[in-house]
Image: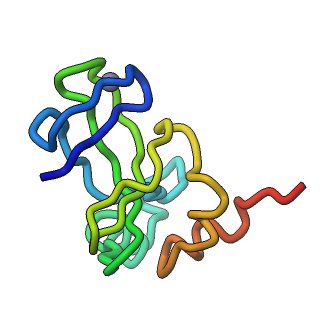
């Protein structure tokens, strides 16, 4: 059983109190004309998902609280949630650095170092 905490309203509940929305940080192909999207880009957007053993970034919806979508970083081996963050935010930098696969590519130019 997963224990999840909504970062928006703060409600804590079990997996059934939330709705899993799949992989986070999927970028829709940017164009004003769908005919300009390549078959490969459309396939990747719709079907290709990262399924790691370990750190996973996912979307959840708070069904029994505020109803908002949010992001979570979870270890798929231990089911431990590493962070909860807004649907408009990126994960903490240390988790972006630990990301693998397509997320590592996605996060590599988004990490701001000060
Ligand atoms: Zn909530």
Give the left or right position of residue 68, taking residue 2 as reference.
right
User: Measuring 41% from the left and 60% from the top, which residue is drawn there?
Assistant: 57
Whole-percent x, y for residue 44 in the image = 37, 72
Whole-percent x, y for residue 72 in the image = 40, 49
Q: Is residue 28 visible?
A: no
Relative height, residue 111 to residue 11 (above, below): below
In which image quadrant can residue 7 be found? top left
Whole-percent x, y for residue 9 in the image = 38, 20
Give the left or right position of residue 112, taking residue 20 as reference.
right
Q: How is the image coloured?
A: rainbow
Front position in the image: 104 or 9: 9
User: Measuring 34% from the left and 48% from the top, which residue is drawn there?
Assistant: 59
Q: Is residue 47 visible?
A: yes
User: Measuring 64% from the left and 63% from the top, which residue is drawn there?
Assistant: 94
Front position in the image: 88 or 98: 98
The number of numbered badges drawn on the structure is: 0
User: Measuring 35% from the left and 32% from the top, which residue is drawn there?
Assistant: 6
């Amino acid at each position: 059983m997963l224990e999840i905490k909504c970062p928006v309203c703060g409600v804590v509940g079990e997996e059934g109190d939330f709705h899993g929305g799949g992989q986070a940080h999927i970028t829709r192909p940017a164009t004003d004309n769908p005919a300009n999207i390549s078959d490969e880009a459309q396939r990747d957007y719709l079907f290709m998902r990262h399924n790691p053993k370990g750190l996973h970034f996912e979307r959840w919806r708070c069904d029994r609280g505020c109803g908002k979508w949010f992001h979570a970083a979870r270890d798929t081996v231990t089911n431990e949630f590493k962070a909860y963050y807004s649907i408009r935010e990126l994960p903490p930098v240390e988790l972006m650095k630990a990301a693998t696969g397509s997320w590592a590519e996605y996060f590599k130019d988004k990490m701001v170092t000060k």
